[in-house]
Image (spheres, rainbow, N blue to C red):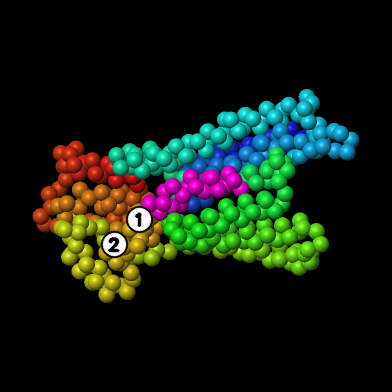
Amino acid sequence: EIPEINYVTVLLFPLVVVALVPLMAWLWSLVRSASAPDRATQGLAAGKVLFTFLLFVARQAVQAGLCEEHPTNQFTMIVHPSVVCWESTHAPFVLAGSLFMGLCVLPFVAACLAATLVHRAHIARGRFWTSTYFWFLFSNWRAQHYHMGATLILRQAVLACVPLLDDFFGLGSVVQFAIIASVLGWWLSLLLSYAPYRVVVAGRADFWISVSLIAFAAVGLALELPGQADIEALKIMIVGLLCCIFLVLVGPAAQLLMKIAWPSRRFLLFLCHHKAGGGVLARWLHLLAEKQTGIPIFLDSDFLDDLERIFDIVKEDVDVVVALLTQLTLTRMWCAGELATACLHGVTSIAVIAESIEEPDAGFFSTAGGRVVGRGSSGT
């Protein structure tokens, strides 16, 4: 009943959810009887919320300055018709929208684009601040397709702005549909060409949701064209499309909830080893363990397609990490990262120590080995 409060509430929704992330993390720790997620995980969750909602809420901020004319020659806000434009009651909306755009939306988008531009160069130099503070931007994508996060922001920005085109420029439904179909068609071509998602299920869900949105926009366009469509048939199509979108969203969500409630691991053991020093031993142990247990054992040579997810596999799909410690194992970045991941996420680890190995001392960690272990831990 109070338009000002209603409008500000919509604008602040993503920021309020971000502010509640620490509280939700604490509640999660109570429910799971475990320690609360670390700050990096909380930052990832907060970034995901902003990434998902901020641009669409920004449309509300822009609409503060959009008015429509009535037959009485009076102009009122489109989002709140009870507010007369360019009078004292309209000023708070314009001020709130301008502040939200200038202090939240534009800096967030600019920071994401800047982080994407420098990400690869910084990783090559051993700097990980982009991975630390913008992990929400890169976490969904394969390493070579890190730029897809920024691309998705641009896609979301265009889709959020399409409804404003009619208000600003008087573009009709046909032009709006053409823009939506073109943007989503371009996005679908990227998904089909590069398969950029790290998780296959997420890529499939995004693909079918994009297809459904194009079909939904086409049905909406048909409803806008008078006398050229069977309204009842289009209503049935709309209900069918909404059901399809619902099922596409429910499937991955149900799979995630089942994984959280009843966690299952794909591999009994993960063999962490240095190829030159322990490759033969790792293969022999792999054959022996699988023969005796009948449960899959992870050896990277058998899963070359999943190597970029190797830290996720250690974290989520392995019961025990077996470290085959030869002289050079801890000097390898990947081995150090695998062991650091297991340590950070409480995965049971067992060391199989070669007779020739010398126990690492302070001097080892202060030279080349220490630099590699430190870098691997930061990357994890």
Q: Quadrant location of the N terminus?
A: top right
Cα–Cα span, label 1 and label 2: 11 Å
- Kindly indicate the quadrant of the structure image that contains residue 227: bottom right
Magenta stretch, residue numbers: 140-159
Q: Secondary structure at mark 1?
A: helix
Residue at position x 74%, y 32% in the image: 4
Magenta-highlighted stretch: main secondary structure?
helix
Q: Which mark is residue 308?
A: 1
Magenta-drawn stretch contains 141: yes
Question: Is residue 314 visible to the viewer in this orientation of the structure?
Answer: no
Residue at position x 75%, y 40% in the image: 79
Q: Position of residue 371 (x, y in %)?
A: 23, 40
Is the residue under label 2 in contact with that under label 1 (CB below 8 Å)?
Answer: no
- Kindly indicate the quadrant of the structure image that contains residue 362: top left
Residue furthest left in the image: 356
* Mark 1 vs mark 2: in front: 1
Left or right for 127, reference 185: left
Amino acid type for the residue under numbered disc 2:
Asp
Q: Position of residue 275 (x, y in %)?
A: 20, 59
Q: Which mark is residue 300?
A: 2
Amino acid type for the residue under numbered disc 1:
Glu
Left or right for 283, reference 16: left
